Image (tube, rainbow, N blue to C red):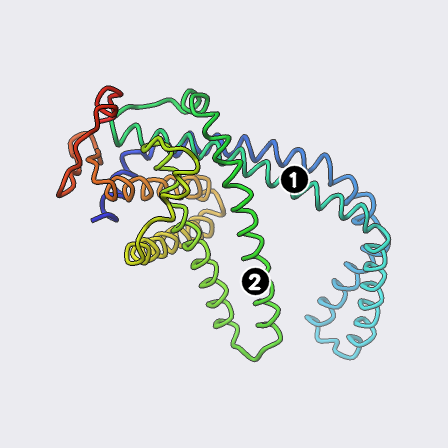
Amino acid sequence: MKFKHTFHVFVDNFSITYKHLLYRLIVFAVAGAICIAGIYPFIQRELLNSAEFTALTDGIRNFVMELLNGNVEVLGDISAKVQAAFDGFITLLQANMAQIVLSGLLLLAVFIIERWFTGMGNYATAAMINDKMAMRQESPFVATLIKNMKRAALYNLIYVPLSVVYDIIVGVGIFYLMFVMVNSFLPFFIGIFLFVLIIVLSVALKLTFTTDWLPALIRGKTSQKEAIKYTFSRSGKKTVDIFSNFIILVLIIFGGNVAASLCTLGVGALITVPASYVLLLCFQFANYYDREEIKYFVDKNKIIRPEKERPSTREEFFKGEE
């Protein structure tokens, strides 16, 4: 039933997807402009226009062309030239290591800041979904973003670094797995299967242990410390249930985004990517409302009531939250 209610809430809040998309495009454009202005001149001047890089690309191109033409006898000489060009390019990279490290640090800083601003948009989107579920209130995106700026900023100040560290650890693990698979005798498709499986499980695991954080802040109006404690206080059986639900959701989202990208040459991803975030937020709030036994709207004509509805507190009644 939780899955069914999630998709009903998602359909009811689908218009938020376009606002979420516009916000993400603005953040992405600004972050991309900073990266291009700060890093591309160095890449273009010192690397892409270098004789070493030109020799490497020409060597690879010649190798491929001769291989396709069936001239196997010259591949040995070309391979030696490619290896020499590759060694020269590595030497060039070593000579510019200080600039490369600075460029990497700039990329990391821009990535973290971009994630922080994106998280601010996620918080506003979550607040809009909650307003719709609790009171059928159509909240404007910008006004909701400004209204919740302080709490959203603090939330992302905690969540984004933790999320980035988790993603880096998972990324290193996946890179190591790929290295092992390349040097093993595993069939190609089994290697791809394991690669996708680890990504799905790692994403679902992160979502499982953070799913109640945002709803506790927005709907429960708790402090950051209480929200973090709340999201980790779920019993084992319920955690397994949430984890399994997130695995299915991640698979649906992954398949939908891949299909939209392949079938529409990437155009469909403009809708499916932001819609994916909205869908995940809808599940988080549906799960929170069910866990707290609070009634909520799935559309304008239907209210989901728990088996044992918790009575509203005096504070909630006068705030108009019930």
Residue nearest the observer in this picture, 97 or 311: 311
Cα separation between marks 2 and 1? 22 Å
The image shows a total of numbered marks equal to 2
Q: Is residue 55 left or right of residue 310?
A: right
Q: Position of residue 277 (x, y in %)?
A: 41, 41
- The residue depicted at 48 percent of the width and 72 percent of the height is 190
Q: Which of marks 2 and 1 is nearer the N terminus?
A: 1
The disc labelled 2 sits on which kind of residue? Gly
Q: Which mark is residue 173?
A: 2
Rendered image quadrant of residue 106: top right
Q: Where is residue 275 in the image (x, y as percent from the top left)?
A: 39, 40
Q: Which mark is residue 89?
A: none
Tag 2–tag 1 contact (CB < 8 Å): no
The disc labelled 1 sits on which kind of residue? Ala
The correct choice, above or below, for 94 with respect to 43 in the image is below
Q: Is residue 116 left or right of residue 252?
A: right
- The residue depicted at 80 percent of the width and 77 percent of the height is 76
Q: Residues within 10 Å of mark 2 (few under 14, many from 20)?
A: few
Disc 1 secondary structure class: helix
- The residue depicted at 15 percent of the width and 38 percent of the height is 309
Q: Residues within 10 Å of mark 1 (few under 14, many from 20)?
A: few
Residue nearest the observer in this picture, 322 or 7: 322
Q: Is residue 201 left or right of residue 34?
A: left
Disc 2 secondary structure class: helix
Q: Where is residue 27 in the image (x, y as percent from the top left)?
A: 55, 32
Residue nearest the observer in this picture, 316 or 199: 316
- The residue depicted at 51 percent of the width and 76 percent of the height is 187
Disc 1 designates what residue?
Answer: 109
The correct choice, above or below, for 120 with respect to 212 in the image is above
Screen quadrant of the C terminus: top left
Q: Position of residue 194 (x, y in %)?
A: 48, 68
